[in-house]
Each structure stands twice: as C-alpha cells, then as structure tokens.
Amino acid sequence: MTPIKIESITKSFHGETAVDAVSLDLASGSFTALLGPSGCGKTTLLRLIAGFERPDAGRILFNERTISDARAVVPPEERNVGVVFQSYALWPHLSVAGNVAYPLKMRGVGSAEIERRVAEALATVELGGFDARDTADLSGGQRQRVALARCLVAEADVIVFDEPLANLDVHLRAAMLETFRQVHRATGRTIVYVTHDQAEALALADRVAVMDHGKLLQFSTPEMLYRAPATGMVARFIGRGGVISAEVTPNEPGRSRVICGQTSFFARSQGQPQGPADVLLRPEALRLVDAGSGGIAGLVRRSTYHGPAYEIEVAVAGGRLVVDAPHALALGSPVSVAVDDAWVVPDPKSS
Ligand SMILES: Nc1ncnc2c1ncn2[C@@H]1O[C@H](COP(=O)(O)OP(=O)(O)OP(=O)(O)O)[C@@H](O)[C@H]1O
C-alpha cells in the first residue's frame, strides 16, 4: 500500500496561483477528501497527485519515492494510480466486462485470470451478472461502478476520485457512498476524493483537507472540522450554524467566557484567547428558552420548515444564530437562546 507525502506543492496557471504551498501527509490506506468551494484548487491538487500536472515548486512522494517535482513527473500510468472521473470515461464500444478487463489486456494477462479478476471486481462494486451489458444501457451510478471496478482490477495502489457523484441524483448518491465506503474497507487502497459537497466529505473520509484560494486551511477528522474549525471560512463552510462577533475573556485553558449583548456563556477555545473573536454556535447546542431566563436576546429573522423541525434564524448582538424549533415563529418576535456549547474560532493572527 502507498502513503502519499505532499511537500509544499505549488501550481500556477498564467500567473494565477491555483495551489499555494500545500503540504499533506496521507497515510497508507487512508481515505482523504479534498473539500472546498469552486475554484479553490482541489482538482488541480488531485491532478498533481495523479500525475496529470507538473508542480512549479514542492514535491510529491509515493512510498517515500519522489514522483513529482518541478523538474520531473512520473506519468500517471507509471505511478499505479486509478482515476474515477465525474464523466465516466468508459469505452463505448466495449461491454461492461470489456471495459473492466481493459487494463489487464493491456498488460497481457491470460484470459482465465482476466475472467476471474473481472468477476471479482464486478462483485465488489455490486455489478455481478452485468458482464455482457452494453455500457450505453447503464445508469450513471452503474457506469461509475464500472469505472471503479476498472481501477480495482488494475490493482491501483492509489485511487483518486474527481467529483464522482456530481451527475447523480440524491438517491443514487447515497447508494454510491455506501459502495465507495465498502470498497475502501475491502481493499484498503489509499483514496483521495475531490468534492465541493461537505456532507459527502464528512460521511466518507477519515480525514478532510479544506482548501480555499489554493491554500490548505485545515486537515483533520470530520469530527474535528465540525467541532473545532480552524478558521472562520471553515466554520461557515462546514455544517449549519452561526458565527457571531463577540468579546471573549479567558476562563481556564481550553475554555473562554463569551460576552454577547447583555449575557455571557462559555465556549471551548484553543488556549486562552482574549478580545474580539468569532464564535461558532451550532443549532444542536442551542435552545429557545423563555424570554428573561438568561439566554441571548434576539429577534426572529427567518423561519423555514426543514423536514421534522423549523430552522429559525435569530438576529443577536454580533450576528445571526440558527436554532431548530418544533413550530414556526413569527418574523420579528423576540426570543431568548440558551447556549450549551460553542467554539471560539482561533484568530489567524495569534497562531
Ligand atoms: N488548465 C488550466 N488552465 C488555466 N487555469 C486553470 C487550469 N486548471 C485550473 N485552472 C484555474 O486554477 C484555479 C483552481 O482550479 P481547480 O479546477 O483546481 O478548482 P476546483 O476547486 O477543483 O474547482 P471546481 O470545483 O469548480 O472544479 C481556478 O482559478 C481555475 O480557473
């Protein structure tokens, strides 16, 4: 299996920096999502990993061997990388089995061996019995599975996915997420997965790299991204919630007091920040309470039905909060919000 080390990799196009000094250590057999808004550089980073682009500076190592730097790039076919694109990139004139067998045929593997390995890969992606089918007759999800089976037979040590679910409807997406997870569990390949969909990244990956404007903002587990985002951008991009501007004072290591209007509450923090700060409040850690019972005072600005609950947006001193409520609330009504948990977003200037 293959660990990937990315050391201060930089890539520009026509003087615009697409990937800006990004460093990442991807453990062998890990599942990493590259996540960020459109244009943040995630596809360029993926293409650098796969060998489709040459970096301007920095280097990439597979298994401690340098495979890309500014002077030389080992081509994709020689670095044992499988690629699953958003567009399926299947051969239209070949059957399902023909597509999956293609890399083995290229290597001159015997036909009995090909048959066995193709059947095994199709079973892994839950396409057993589809061998003879024409790829033109398959759904988007099934084509994605064929592309994945083709990477599996080729025994790619590293599989990179470029927004593989972007063209699929919501139900198919859920089924494909389960297939990706199961293939990762069963094969232990090192996977790098590009998406702009945070729910997809959090559900699939064991570590998520969040990028913005070519820079890496945070590389951590989904839980840490959600609970302790490293920057205001990550706090706003991941999950639901409100980020307010408030005054914080130290309480004890890892815990601060936040002053918001006439009230204050405790929040988790990195170290003991002091002064103005951004504070993240998630809806599940907030409760609407009776006015005057000590919560943050605010006014209802939006009340939207979201499945089983109403999502209420509340304007408070320093910003807006999002709270879930069992019933709709009238716009402009005064409310009070109690805080069970919050996070002081670290100040980039102090780190
Ligand atoms: N081949 C190229 N030539 C010129 N500019 C490019 C090229 N590839 C990427 N870029 C630019 O580099 C920046 C990062 O692009 P990239 O495709 O990596 O972003 P992304 O995060 O994957 O976005 P999206 O989700 O929209 O695909 C963008 O400004 C893009 O226009």
Image (cartoon, rainbow, N blue to C red):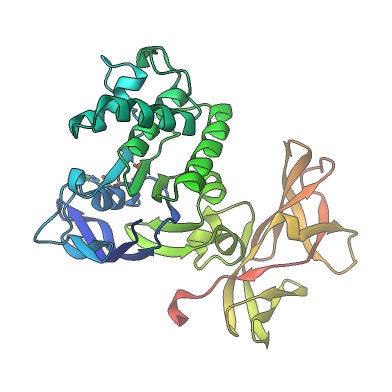
Reply above or below: 229 against 180: below
| Relative side of 142 to 1, left or right | right
Q: How many marks?
A: 0
Res 131 seen here: yes
Residue at horizontal 48 percent and vertical 60 percent from the top: 233
Q: Position of residue 334 (x, y in %)?
A: 82, 54
Q: Position of residue 144 (x, y in %)?
A: 41, 29
Q: Quadrant of residue 83?
A: top left
Residue at horizontal 45 percent and vertical 64 percent from the top: 218
The residue nearer to you, when weighing 69 against 239, is 69
| Relative side of 84 to 248, left or right | left
Res 39 seen here: no
Please state the quadrant of the image where ligand 1 appears: top left
| Relative side of 349 to 285, left or right | left
Q: Quadrant of residue 95?
A: top left
Reply above or below: 59 against 48: below
| Relative side of 74 to 214, left or right | left
Reply above or below: 283 against 264: above
Residue at horizontal 53 percent and vertical 38 percent from the top: 177
